[in-house]
């Protein structure tokens, strides 16, 4: 080792110069590698490499180091980086080497750059000039190297600089250059789709290239494009089919064969493209049946590569519009996979089955014995895939066996991701199919104790919500709750030190809320148990807050114990705990107050929140009279902050909420306590919101919620439990069928007997279900715990609450599980200035209140918005034959606004759903029309709309409790786009009941584009000028100039104005300025100049992504013109 | 494909190619975890592995593990064949390639990989074309310190040594 070090240190450039050739130079790497292998300890290696690195560092900065030596050093530093050491000093030299070296040095330099620098590294900017130079080089190798590096790492912002050169390469005589250019464009498309928008025609040229390699490369782009919008490329189906036919028919040069299979990579790529094109499209699918059949037939050889093709074929067959004959062949193929002794093929067989059982559950039945074997397989991967398959075929009859298997697997599993994933699935199944209360609670106990604190928060939230919301029958709910309480008390009586925090939180909430249901347990005993928990060291402070809240709820009448407890905690380090202890003492001393604040067993009962905080008015006016500063809303404060930038007030604004978290108090909002704590500030609503702590779940709006607060109340009592009926009917048949299938098995040994028993319990119910059509998913049996329909619950609420601190989640306690945030953001427009809405309106019996509501709506839309969403929408007698006259149904206040045509989203025999976009100034209104196509009434129609990238600010009429025959209901969502996205897709579903107890769901989806959210920004030329200078993010691009009629600039701008809602501020000579904004938010200014035959467009905006999006739509608008 | 790793039975990294931008720390963490997981698997187990939200496809050739990360919708078997084709290319280029060839000429192994896979996608699947491209670039290099042996290598039976061929019957 010392030898090497010495040599390295003394290595003088002259040493290398005197030695000839690369052979000697590469010896340095060899020496390094050899000396590393000789070392025994990690520590030795570390010190050796450190020395090596510092020697290299010295050498690279020495002016006498030749390019050749530099190349050698670069190789060594790549090696050191691979070993995990930092050689970042050499990054800049890698770029230099690529820039200045000869061809060989360049090659190493480029390689080093592609290994060292990942996308977005600032040094990459220095590479741009070198790449430009090499792209123009006549030396083929240099051009190749430049393209190779461009296709791997290239700064997004500099793409326009190289784009024309890369485009030119598409018509280069050498296929290797064309191929690399195509892949470079693919890379550009991935990182900045807008930039290559205009060269789609060239992609087509690449697809038609005479060289199969270039054509294959272009398929990467097409796969991506088609994934995003299959409809735009349906016309290419014929071409893809022809290409695949030729490949399968062996028309390609033999070079492309791989183990005598013609171009397998190409085949697979084409199959994937075809399956995307043929999905849900019968006529397109018909074009490909023949070639798929051919592919299935040709791929007979027993080699991995043919199986790869077969697998893709099977997937395609099951994705496109079904054809019985092909499905049969594909099913046989899957059989071959599943039964194969080769483990890789078996795995793929299971994967294919998992994919296919959604369409055809019978197939799983055919392979039940293999599946059972795989369940006990020694390979983790196989087991897990089998469980995935079982998850898909779970029904009410086999749920307990399958869940048991999954839990067994979970117990032996140590991989975090797997646990999170599978535990979530178990919880889902338990909720959907639980046969009885005890099983459900027991299973959830297992989920919580195995999954522990890894579990997603929404699992425990959903569970608690389910307990709290309950179903129709109070008796059943109480039984479930009682069972939970019993089970938890037993657990807590044992050793609770090993229980995960999440589980303790769930338990303490349930015990706090429902332990009074259990009459034979003394409350003081419960308190003792909870206090024991509090004393445990392993319990986190968040959990302590949960426990304390539970104690607060059951403290009534146990003053002595509680006072003692409150005393001991009031000296805690944790301010929140202290706060809670304080409240606890306060409440336990005043049982009346306690009764009022925390009424027993009323977690879900109606609750009123006076969000206008009118009870504080007196306090505020007193404070103002005493000289306090008047309240300013946050945006105003923000502005003032900006004005006086010199003073940084941020730390103060952060410190305030801490003291404010004290308004959290207990979960039931108590005006009295509130007023105590709000003494801290002038107005607590705004501040608590700003703090993000959401301590009070006020969200600025008055609302009333309750057990059925946001739901239409069932008007008829449900006669029988929906679960028991079907399961009772189905079970015997299912078992019988399963038994019949098992009969032909020869001489079962005891072991196989066991397996068969398992099989019959696993696959029960499948056969009956599978009698439904191949495509139509078999209708799921009604879940035991029917969640009430609610507008897009968990994801929204979790996203809105995810930002809140631990503090907030803990202090919310009992409302952790409510959708309160959700509703805060879903409420209609402005917060109502009105205060009390009579409770009865939202509570129950919507029926008698309908009229009241209707009246109210006509008077003020505000009230409508504020009282929890049950709005009875306009139900108009109407024959929903054509969608065009649906626009006449737009509410009067929307009719005059600009709106799009009505497009049909989806339909089934009973309902059809169409949508229309109404462009309001401050939001996009997505109006959804639900037409009843039958003569009968449809009940409980609920619309859910999901779109992660958009914000729903209000909705109206998404729940209709009765849609009469041939009538149309209108519901609308006001959507905001905060972050610009070129296109945003939304999904949604309409659930409804034709017969009571049978909920049908109809899902729909669609896309919205930025263009829908763009509004003209009316400014003067002066204002434009000022604004322009203040904006930072800019994008420049040349666009097509429309020259067909009149003044080209005017024509082009008008064309843009027609498609996008832009405001043309001014046109001066060959320049035009245009302004728009994203709803009422960020502006985007466009500066257009005629430049020869192109329109040079320069966009600026405060939002980085906005110019890109607008540019994209401008390009499209002009291309379509 | 998201990334490709080559590592030895001892867990030493021999080659790494990342097709998704990740920070160094994350790369190291992934490498460490994956090497551990893959090395712990028994020879008869299947070559696929669900890992985080990715699918890992790996194969062992003599003392070297070739390991690729793909997304869920990608085809596992074809990825296995990508690995195999890469080994074939290395074998043809070095002539009966062994781990030592890759250690000492790792930059060559990278060059070959870049001709075969570009940006995570198969670029050229014709063996002849890949090698032609590499040779053309190599020809420019004076003083080659190794011979390009184009004859297919003799298969070696010994597994344990680093100098045994990657291909075994």
Image (cartoon, coloured by chain):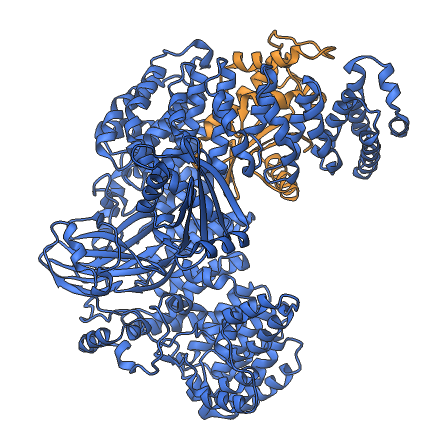
Chain colours: A blue, B orange
Viewer-proximal residue among A623 and A710: A623
Question: Can you name the residue that lies furthest to the front here?
Answer: A1069
* Quadrant housing the C terminus of chain A: top left
Front residue of B101/A491: it is B101
Q: Is residue A188 left or right of residue A55?
A: left
Q: Residue at x 18, y 55 (%)?
A: A887
Above or below for A140 versus A897 = above
Residue B163 shows in this picture: no
Left or right: A660, with A62 as reference point = left
Residue A845: where, in percent of width, then height? Answer: 22, 76
Q: Residue at x 55, y 39 (%)?
A: A157
* Screen quadrant of the N terminus of chain A: top right
What is the number of callouts on the image? Answer: 0
Residue A547, x across and y down, in percent = 54, 75
Can you tell which quarter of the image residue A758 is in? top left
Q: Is residue A89 left or right of residue A677?
A: right
Please tell me whether residue A417 is drawn above or below residue A940 in the rendered image: above
Q: Which of the 4 quarters of the picture holds residue A266?
A: top left
Task: List x then y, in percent, for residue A302.
Answer: 41, 18
Q: Is residue B39 above or below residue A1034?
A: above
Examine the rendered structure and indicate whether residue A180 appears above or below residue A445. Answer: above
**Residue A712 appears in the picture as rendered:** yes
The x and y percentages for residue A352 are 37, 34
Instruction: Residue lying at the far top in this picture: please name it.
Output: B151
């Amino acid at each position: 080792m010392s030898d090497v070090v010495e040599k390295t240190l003394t290595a003088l450039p002259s040493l290398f110069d005197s030695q000839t050739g690369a052979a000697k130079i590469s010896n340095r790497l060899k020496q390094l590698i050899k000396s590393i292998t000789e070392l025994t300890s990690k520590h030795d290696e570390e010190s050796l490499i450190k020395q090596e690195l510092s020697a290299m560092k010295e050498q690279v900065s020495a002016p006498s180091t030749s390019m050749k030596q530099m190349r050698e050093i670069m190789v060594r530093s790549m090696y050191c980086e691979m070993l995990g050491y930092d050689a970042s000093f050499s990054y800049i030299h890698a770029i230099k080497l690529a820039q200045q070296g000869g061809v060989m040095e360049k090659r190493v330099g480029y390689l080093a750059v592609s290994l060292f620098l990942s996308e977005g590294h600032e040094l990459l900017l220095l590479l741009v000039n070198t790449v430009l130079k090499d792209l123009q080089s006549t030396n083929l190798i240099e051009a190749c190297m430049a393209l190779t590096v461009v296709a791997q790492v290239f700064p997004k912002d500099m793409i326009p600089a190289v784009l024309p050169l890369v485009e030119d390469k598409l018509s280069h005589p050498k296929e290797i250059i064309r191929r690399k250019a195509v892949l470079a464009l693919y890379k550009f498309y991935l990182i900045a789709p807008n930039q290559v928008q205009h060269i789609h025609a060239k992609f087509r040229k690449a697809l038609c290239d005479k060289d199969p390699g270039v054509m294959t490369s272009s398929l990467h782009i097409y796969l991506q494009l088609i994934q995003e919008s299959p409809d735009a490329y349906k016309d290419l189906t014929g071409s893809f089919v022809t290409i695949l036919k030729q490949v399968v028919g062996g028309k390609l040069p033999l070079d492309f064969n791989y183990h005598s299979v013609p171009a397998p990579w190409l085949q697979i790529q084409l199959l994937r493209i075809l399956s995307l094109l043929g999905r849900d499209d019968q006529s397109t699918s018909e074009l490909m049946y023949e070639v798929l059949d051919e592919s299935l037939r040709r791929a007979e050889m027993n080699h991995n590569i043919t199986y790869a093709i077969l697998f893709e074929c099977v997937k395609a067959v099951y994705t496109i519009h079904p054809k019985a004959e092909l499905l049969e062949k594909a099913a046989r193929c899957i059989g071959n996979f599943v039964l194969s002794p080769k483990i890789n093929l078996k795995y793929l067989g299971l994967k294919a089955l998992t994919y296919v059982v959604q369409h055809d559950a019978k197939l799983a039945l055919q392979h039940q014995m293999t599946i059972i074997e795989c369940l006990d397989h020694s390979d983790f991967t196989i087991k897990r895939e089998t469980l995935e398959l079982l998850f898909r075929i779970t029904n009410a009859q086999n749920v307990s066996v399958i869940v048991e298997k999954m839990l067994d697997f979970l117990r032996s599993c140590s991989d975090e991701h797997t646990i999170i994933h599978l535990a979530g699935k178990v919880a889902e199944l338990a909720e959907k199919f639980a046969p009885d209360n005890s099983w459900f609670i027991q299973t959830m106990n297992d989920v919580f104790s195995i999954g522990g604190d890894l579990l997603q928060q929404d699992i425990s939230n959903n569970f608690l919500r389910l307990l709290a919301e309950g179903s129709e029958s109070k008796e059943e709910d109480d039984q479930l709750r009682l069972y939970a309480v019993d089970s938890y008390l037993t657990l807590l009586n044992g050793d609770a030190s090993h229980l995960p925090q999440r589980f303790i939180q769930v338990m303490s909430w349930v015990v706090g809320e429902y332990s009074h249901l259990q009459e034979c347990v003394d409350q003081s005993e419960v308190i003792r148990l909870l206090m024991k928990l509090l004393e445990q060291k392993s319990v986190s402070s968040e959990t302590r807050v949960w426990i304390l809240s539970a104690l607060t709820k059951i403290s009534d009448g146990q003053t002595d114990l509680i006072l003692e407890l409150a005393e001991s905690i009031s000296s805690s380090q944790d301010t929140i705990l202290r706060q809670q202890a304080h409240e606890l003492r306060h409440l336990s001393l005043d049982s009346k107050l306690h009764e009022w604040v925390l009424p027993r067993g009323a977690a879900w009962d109606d609750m009123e929140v006076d969000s206008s905080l009118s009870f504080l008015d007196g306090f505020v006016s007193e404070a103002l009279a005493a000289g306090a500063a008047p309240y300013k809303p946050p945006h105003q404060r923000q502005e003032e902050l900006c004005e006086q930038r010199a003073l940084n007030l941020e730390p103060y604004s952060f410190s305030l909420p801490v003291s404010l978290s004290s308004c959290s108090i207990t979960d039931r909002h108590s005006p009295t306590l509130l007023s105590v704590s709000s003494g801290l500030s002038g107005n607590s609503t705004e501040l608590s919101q700003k703090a993000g702590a959401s301590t009070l779940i006020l969200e600025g709006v008055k609302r009333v919620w309750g057990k059925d607060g946001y739901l239409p109340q069932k008007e008829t009592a449900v006669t029988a439990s929906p679960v028991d009926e079907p399961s009772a009917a189905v079970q015997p048949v299912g078992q019988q069928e399963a038994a019949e299938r098992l009969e032909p098995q020869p001489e079962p040994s005891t072991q196989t007997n066991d397996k068969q028993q398992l099989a019959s319990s696993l696959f029960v119910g499948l056969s009956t279900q599978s009698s439904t059509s191949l495509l139509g998913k078999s209708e799921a049996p009604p879940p035991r715990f029917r969640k009430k329909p609610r507008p897009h619950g968990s994801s929204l609420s979790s996203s809105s609450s995810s930002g809140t601190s631990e503090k907030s989640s803990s202090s919310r306690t009992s409302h952790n599980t409510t959708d309160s945030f959700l509703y805060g953001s879903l409420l209609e427009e402005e917060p109502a200035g009105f205060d009390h809405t009579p409770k009865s309106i939202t509570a129950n019996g919507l029926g008698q209140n309908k009229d009241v509501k209707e009246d109210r709506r006509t008077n003020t839309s505000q009230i409508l918005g504020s009282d929890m969403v049950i709005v009875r929408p306009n139900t108009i007698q109407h024959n929903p034959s054509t969608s065009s006259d649906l626009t006449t149904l737009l509410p009067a206040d929307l009719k005059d606004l600009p709106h799009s045509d009505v497009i049909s989203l989806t339909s089934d025999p009973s309902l059809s759903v169409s949508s229309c976009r109404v462009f309001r100034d401050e939001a996009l209104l997505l109006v959804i029309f639900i037409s009843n196509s039958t003569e009968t009434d449809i009940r409980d129609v609920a619309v859910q709309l999901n779109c992660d990238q958009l914000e729903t600010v209000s909705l109206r009429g998404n729940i209709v409790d009765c849609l009469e025959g041939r009538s149309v209901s209108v519901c609308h969502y006001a959507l905001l786009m905060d972050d610009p996205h070129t296109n945003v897709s939304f999904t949604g579903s309409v659930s409804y009941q034709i017969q009571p107890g049978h909920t049908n769901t109809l899902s729909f989806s669609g896309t919205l584009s930025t263009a829908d959210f763009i509004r003209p920004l009316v400014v003067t030329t002066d204002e434009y000028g000022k604004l322009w200078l203040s904006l930072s993010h800019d994008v420049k691009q040349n666009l097509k100039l429309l020259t067909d009629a009149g003044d080209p600039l005017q024509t082009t701008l008008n064309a843009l104005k027609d498609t996008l809602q832009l405001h043309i501020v001014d046109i001066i000579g060959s320049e035009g300025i245009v302004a728009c904004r994203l709803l009422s938010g960020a502006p985007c200014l466009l500066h257009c100049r005629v430049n020869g035959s192109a329109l040079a467009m320069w966009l600026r905006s405060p939002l980085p992504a906005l110019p890109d999006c607008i540019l994209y739509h401008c390009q499209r608008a002009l291309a379509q013109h | 494909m998201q990334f490709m790793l080559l590592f030895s039975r001892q867990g030493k990294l021999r080659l790494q190619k990342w097709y998704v931008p990740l920070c160094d720390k994350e790369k190291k963490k992934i490498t460490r975890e994956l090497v551990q997981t893959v090395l712990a698997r028994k020879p008869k187990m299947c070559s696929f592995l669900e890992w985080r939200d990715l699918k890992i496809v790996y194969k062992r050739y003599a003392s070297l593990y070739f390991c690729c990360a793909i997304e869920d919708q990608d085809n596992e078997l074809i990825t296995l064949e990508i690995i195999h084709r890469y080994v074939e290319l290395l074998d043809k280029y070095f002539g009966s390639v062994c781990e030592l060839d890759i250690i000492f000429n790792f930059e060559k192994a990278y060059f070959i990989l870049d001709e075969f896979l570009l940006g995570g996608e198969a670029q050229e699947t014709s063996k002849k074309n890949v090698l032609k491209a590499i040779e053309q670039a190599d020809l420019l290099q004076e003083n080659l310190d190794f011979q390009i042996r184009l004859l297919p290598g003799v298969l070696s039976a010994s597994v344990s040594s680093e100098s045994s061929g990657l291909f075994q019957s």
